[in-house]
Image (spheres, rainbow, N blue to C red):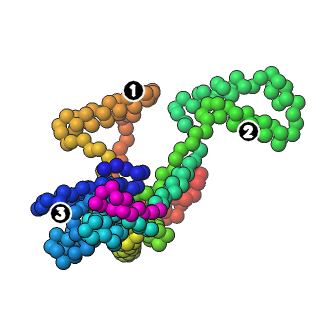
Amino acid sequence: MFKINASVLCALVYRPPKINCNFIQEFAELLSFMASCADKLLILGDFNIHICCPSKPLVNEFLGLVDSFKLVQSVMAPTHQKGHTLDLVLSSGFSVSNVKIVDTGVSDHFMILFESSLFCPPPPPPSSYSLVRAIKSTTASQFTNTFMLSLSPAVLDSLSTCTDTEDLLTLFNTSCLATLDSVAPLKQKRCKSNRSTTPWLNSTTCSLRKACRKAERKWKKDKLQVSYDIFRDSLKAYQITVKAAKAAFYAELIHKNAHRPKVLFNTINKIINPPTTMSSLPATTETCEMFLNFFIDKIDNIKSHITPSISDPALYQSVVCRLQQFQPVSSSQLCYLPFYLEHH
């Protein structure tokens, strides 16, 4: 068994003419393995099965197995001197044409010639990139030092003689940009898209998700029952739409790849066994203690960098006079209260 390229898997099979009760089971296991490894299959060889006699039990069982894996048998003429079709060409995922059977006289089996066009899909488009700068905690100090060193005497003379504001601003921006490029140069970063993990999302689901999040923020802000009802209805509508879009996506994927068992197997495997993106640590006592000590050390480190205040807020002066009771106030005194507060 050998590979032509990354998408086609070829196998050469020989079945001895003697009776083998386990051949169908072994051949089914071979087809299952090949279907999980490649999208396109090509199986050649001498099977010693009389395909021209479909009434025989072995032939009927073999043809049923071939049909269940969407394999196409392209040899329709005798390939043996006794007039039986024993040598087969089974293919899946591509077409086989111009099948010719030639008697070379070297063997009692005939030679089979055929043509096939193997279409290799184009490479995926390159991922989009964005230009970013790596800003660190030391970037500000490096920028200041580099900028001061870049102010040569010639630059200072041009600044002193320049009277146009636009020219000064252009010179300043150019100097800052050159300094920033030397301290934190631009680097390409591949833009990640959620379409790789959630390919069923579309404009409708995205708009519903945006409305759902907006309703959630409003409910968290005012805590009203009517806001909660709106948020609940929008969340339910979003979940129903996403479920329908997901089902439609997988239905279309299965329909388009009905002849590609590898894609079907991988799709079912992803649904049943979704990949884990994060490696979770076991919840042990040592892990909890490490987690606790990490935050304790972090808080102590922050406290050590805080400059202590001169006045201690815990110290307070004793109050001599304390209010123990209220004296009743007449309406005439209330009328003169604003005048008293204005002049005092």
Estimate the x, y position of residue 143 in percent, counting from the top left: 63, 30
- Which image quadrant for residue 248? bottom left
Estimate the x, y position of residue 79 in percent, counting from the top left: 31, 66
Q: Residue at x 60, y 27 (%)?
A: 142
Q: Which mark is first along the chain, 3 or 1?
A: 3
- Which image quadrant for residue 299? top left
Residue 69 visible in the displayed image: no
| Neighbours of disc 3 within 10 Å: few (<14), some (14-19), many (20+) | some
Identify the mark at residue 173; answer none if there is no mark.
2
Comparing 200 with 319, the one in front is 200
Element under disc 1: helix
Give amino acid for label 1.
Ser
Identify the mark at residue 304; answer none if there is no mark.
1
Please give the residue where the numbered disc 3 appears in the rendered image: 24
Whether residue 125 is in magenta: the answer is no
Per the rendered image, the range of residues in magenta is 102-117
Q: Is residue 57 left or right of residue 80?
A: left
Inter-mark Cα distance, 2 to 3:
77 Å
Q: Which residue is drawn at 21% across and 66% down?
A: 49
Comparing 39 with 306, the one in front is 39
| Neighbours of disc 2 within 10 Å: few (<14), some (14-19), many (20+) | few
In front: mark 1 or mark 3? 3
